Amino acid sequence: MKNTSKFNKAIWLIKTQLFLKPRFSKIDKRSIVFFPMQIDNPQAISIGKKIFISNNAWLAGGKDSNGKDTLIIDDYTRIGHFFHCIALHDVYIGKSVLIADKVFISDASHIYKDIDLPIFAQGMENLRSVSIGDGSWIGENVCILGANIGKHSVIGANSVVLQDIPDYCVAVGSPARVVRKYDFETKKWVTVE
C-alpha cells in the first residue's frame, strides 16, 4: 500500500508541473495540486514549497494585478477539498497553515446596490486584504471575508470571520469571536470571558 501511495504522489507531482507550472506566477516543483479544479487568472497566483491542495479547489487571482501576485500560498500549507479563494487584490496564506474542507476565503464581495440588475451582473467590490498567520488551523466550512487571522490561531468549524482574530487565539461562531487564547505565563490555553 505504501508503494501505491508513493506512486500516486509521483504521478500528481508530474501532473502539477506539466499542467500548472506554465500557468501560475510561481509554483514549487514539490507542490501537489489535485484535479479537477478551477483556476481564474493563474498568472496572479503564487504557490510556495511543498503545498498540498486537494481536489475541487477554485482559486481566483485578480484580473488587473499588473504583475502583482494577488493570491500567495506560502510554504508547507495543506488545503482540503472544495477550497474556494477569491483574491482580487491581496490574499496571503502563511506557512504551515492547515485548511480543512469547504473553506471560503475572499478579499471581495458581490455588489448588490442596483435592484434593477441581477447581483451577478453588478461586479465585485474590494473588502479588505486577507492574511492567515503561520501555523494556523482553519476548520471545516469556515468563511473568511476581508479579515486577518493571527499566527497559530484556530478558527472553529462553520465559523464566519468578519473581523481580525489575534495571534494564538481560538475563535468560533457566526460572526466568529475569540473564546480561548494562549497564556504564555502558564503555557496553557485559557477561556476568554
Image (cartoon, grey):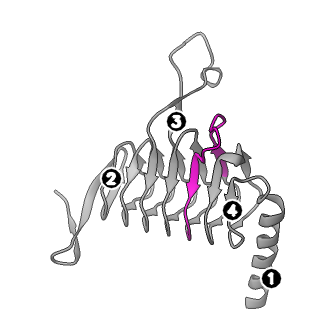
Q: Position of residue 43 (x, y in %)?
A: 70, 47
> Mark 2 — residue?
165
Query: Of the residues shown, which amino acid type is indicated by label 4?
Result: Ile
SS class, disc 3: strand
Q: Which residues are magenta?
A: 58-76
Q: CA distance from mark 3 to mark 4?
A: 24 Å
Q: In the image, is 172 to the left or to the right of 120? A: left
> Mark 1 — residue?
7
> Mark 4 — residue?
27
SS class, disc 2: loop
> Mark 3 — residue?
108
Q: CA distance from mark 1 to mark 2?
A: 40 Å
> In the displayed image of the protein, which residue is found farthest to the bottom?
2
Q: Earlier in the sequence, mark 1 or mark 3?
A: 1
Query: Of the residues shown, which amino acid type is indicated by label 1?
Result: Phe
79 over 44 or under it: above or below: below
Q: Earlier in the sequence, mark 2 or mark 4?
A: 4
| Closer to the camera in the image, 158 or 30 | 30
Q: CA distance from mark 1 to mark 3?
A: 39 Å
